[in-house]
Image: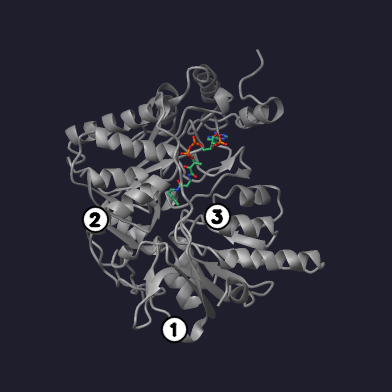
Amino acid sequence: MSAEQAAEFIKPGMTVAMSGFTGAGYPKAVPGALAAQMERQHAAGKDFKINVLTGASTAPELDGVLAKAEGMNLRLPYMSDPELRRRINDGNMEYMDIHLSHVAQHAWFGFYGKIDLAIVEVVGVTAEGALIPSSSVGNNKTWLEMADKVIIEVNSQQPAAMEGMHDVYYGTALPPHRKPIDLRTVRDRIGQQYMNVDVNKIVAVVETDAPDRLSPFAPVDETSEKIADHLLTFLDSEIRAGRLSEKLLPLQSGVGNIANAVLAGLSRGGYKGLTAYTEVIQDGMLELIKDGTIEFASATSFSLSSEGIEEFNRNVDHYRKRILLRAQEISNHPEIIRRLGCIALNGMIEADIYGNVNSTNVLGSHVMNGIGGSGDFARNGYLSVFMSPSTAKGGKISGIVPMASHVDHTEHDTMILITEQGLADLRGHSPKQRAQIVIDNCAHPEYRPMLQDYFDRACKESYGKHTPHLLGEALSWHERFRQTGDMRPAN
Ligand code: 0RQ
């Protein structure tokens, strides 16, 4: 049926779970039709809002249109749409930022209430009635199982050759009946190629022919190249120290421009036969698979630019043998990440001198995207690395601050911090030792003396001397930026 007819099944107040992960495999037509209905209702003075659950970020055709229509009470988890971000930060709707590995199980635990309807994009339906997953798997298995009603969008623009690239695991159970998940290498298949659905729940099938959100990346600049070089030097020294082999350990690479640039850097590093156990295959990862740097990658989704999609389609047979997409509860599962010993490489907004990392909230209050899977990998990985330029907004903001204005990854979870200035290896160090290493290696020269001054005075005047802080001053840099537009004092 048409998207408009399908959208009629969605009523105000419903909780609607949708496919989609980092701009891939999200429904393209029904959300737009729904937004139009919402706008008509709002114009007639009626309320029409729903709760929206997804895998991770989607695109203007989903998050963007529903945000513009003022159609969401609550959205979870990760998002990156500018319209949605604006409404959340204006305080006009609720947003719950959750570790991506937690979403499916929290839904099963009943933490989000009943799921009324699921909208899931697929590549096709087999003769037996199983669903061929699209360019992301995300939480689709859970949504299809939990929702009362299901709308399927069949997108003919997704490469049909994707069939067979998925591994959907049906072995998860609720505590206390859980069993070990028997995934021992990144290439292990533990599930099935297709997703199950109870056909009695399907209320609509809508055909679409539209591309995923295209994710262009900024060209690799000098700053990200320096960050990549510091990481490569560190990995080499870990190999020499015998803590890593030449094949490293499975890489997880976060989203964003820095992460993409770091991947590009890895191919310069001369590595061969590496593996990735990660969430997202972005352009940089595709390049590494193409040139043999990475021999196999497991993820839950693609996030490609238009050139990346062309490359994927051109060499799809090559990639089919080297990529598996899994549900996000498996791609991000703590048990598996710890067993495989992933090297977690993620971006950050700021870190404090003790190594607490803020990935999500500018000035402690304005959410950027969300924690995504960074926490799943940082806490459970063999190595957790966070990277950022040492300053933002033309030097007016320091990425290294006395106290993080919001904490996503605590000092207990962070091992390595990298800026273009250098790399701080915090492993095996106490808070005061960590602070000196961070100041010496990661701070921008303009901010380094200010941080040293703060730390020296804190060491003398702090109430406790374990993690010295001057509480009245710890967030003054952020406050100064709020008032003057610059973290640096006028003099
Ligand atoms: O904003 O574009 O308006 O100038 O933040 O910053 O330097 O381009 O870095 O693209 O790598 O993103 C943490 C957001 C970094 C990302 C974050 C501003 C800066 C710019 C982007 P503008 P950059 P990146 C797996 C893992 C959490 C989720 C995650 C992220 C914008 O890495 O979302 O890791 N991570 N998931 O100007 C104010 C600061 C700032 C700042 C940067 N200190 N203060 N603004 N910015 N630092 C994948 C998934 O989970 C799906």
Q: Quick one: SS at disc 3?
A: loop
Label annotation for residue 97 = 3
Dot 3 amino acid type: Asp
Q: Quick one: SS at disc 2?
A: loop
Q: Quick one: SS at disc 1?
A: loop
Residue 331 at x, y percent in the picture: 35, 59
Q: Earlier in the sequence, mark 2 or mark 1?
A: 1
Query: Considering depth in this image, is 182 or 145 the residue closer to the camera?
Result: 145
Number of marks present in the image shown: 3
Query: Considering depth in this image, is 129 or 21 the residue closer to the camera?
Result: 129
| 2 and 1 marks in contact (CB < 8 Å) | no
Dot 1 amino acid type: Asp
Q: CA distance from mark 3 to mark 1?
A: 30 Å
Among the 4 quarters of the image, the one containing residue 60: bottom right
For image coordinates 25% across by 47% down, the residue present is: 289
Residue 185 falls left or right of residue 421: left
Query: Split into 4 quadrants, where in the image is the C terminus?
Result: top right
Dot 2 amino acid type: Arg
Few, some or many C-alpha atoms within 10 Å of disc 3 (few <14, some 14-19, many ≥20)? Answer: some
Q: CA distance from mark 2 to mark 1?
A: 31 Å
Q: Earlier in the sequence, mark 3 or mark 1?
A: 3
Residue 171 at x, y percent in the picture: 33, 74
Among the 4 quarters of the image, the one containing residue 170: bottom left
- Residue receiving disc 2: 322
Residue 370 at x, y percent in the picture: 53, 49
Q: Decide if ligand 1 comes within 8 Å of the CB at mark 3.
A: no
Label annotation for residue 185 = none
- Residue receiving disc 1: 198
Q: Is residue 397 visible?
A: yes
